[in-house]
Image (cartoon, helix red, strand yellow):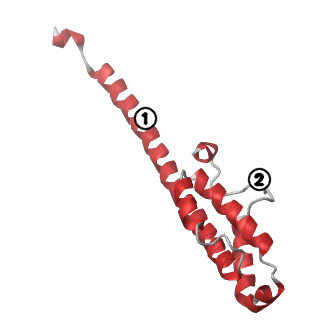
Amino acid sequence: MKEVIKNNPLFNSQGDPKYFKETELVYILEMFDTNYKNFKKAKMVDPFHRKALDTLSAIMTDLNMSKQFSQITQNVKDPSVSNTIYLLEKCRYFIDARKLIFQVLKDIMKQEEMITDIRHVVDLNLSESVDETVIA
């Protein structure tokens, strides 16, 4: 992931309006929780549903999970309140998974740097400690 190298663990940190940010997801899920009936009556879910699909697609593509995206969204193409909540929860789940994967990859990079440093120190000490007159 190029974001690991850039040290950018947040999804949509640039603020692209096509995708939800994590904070927006939490807020919208709370809104759906408290105003479920109002959303259902007013049929206001279409923009949330579309944006949730776009967000989930972007996250899962970033995680190299495009095939799984098709499987997950196969039954939730209809913009109903329950389908939208399902997609929003999946977005939040995959954002959390993305953060964990980011942390693991970052830890692996740190470990590789430490191994390189240790090898350098060992090689340096070995080259200084070998007395060529003793070997001959």
Q: Please, what is the three-letter code of the amino acid marked with disc 1?
A: Asp
Q: Is residue 108 above or below residue 124?
A: below
Write down the quadrant of residue 29 in the picture. bottom right
**Location of mark 1 (residue):** 117
On the question of residue 14 being in view, the answer is yes
Q: Please, what is the three-letter code of the amino acid marked with disc 2?
A: Gln
Q: CA distance from mark 2 to mark 1?
A: 34 Å
On the question of residue 10 being in view, the answer is no
* Closer-to-camera residue (78/23): 78
* Closer-to-camera residue (107/95): 95
**Location of mark 2 (residue):** 14
Image quadrant containing the C terminus: top left
Local SS, label 2: loop
Residue at screen point 40% across, 29% down: 120
Residue at screen point 46% across, 39% down: 113
- Is 20 placed left or right of 63 in the picture? right
Q: Position of residue 121 (x, y in %)?
A: 38, 31
- Is 108 placed left or right of 50 in the picture? left
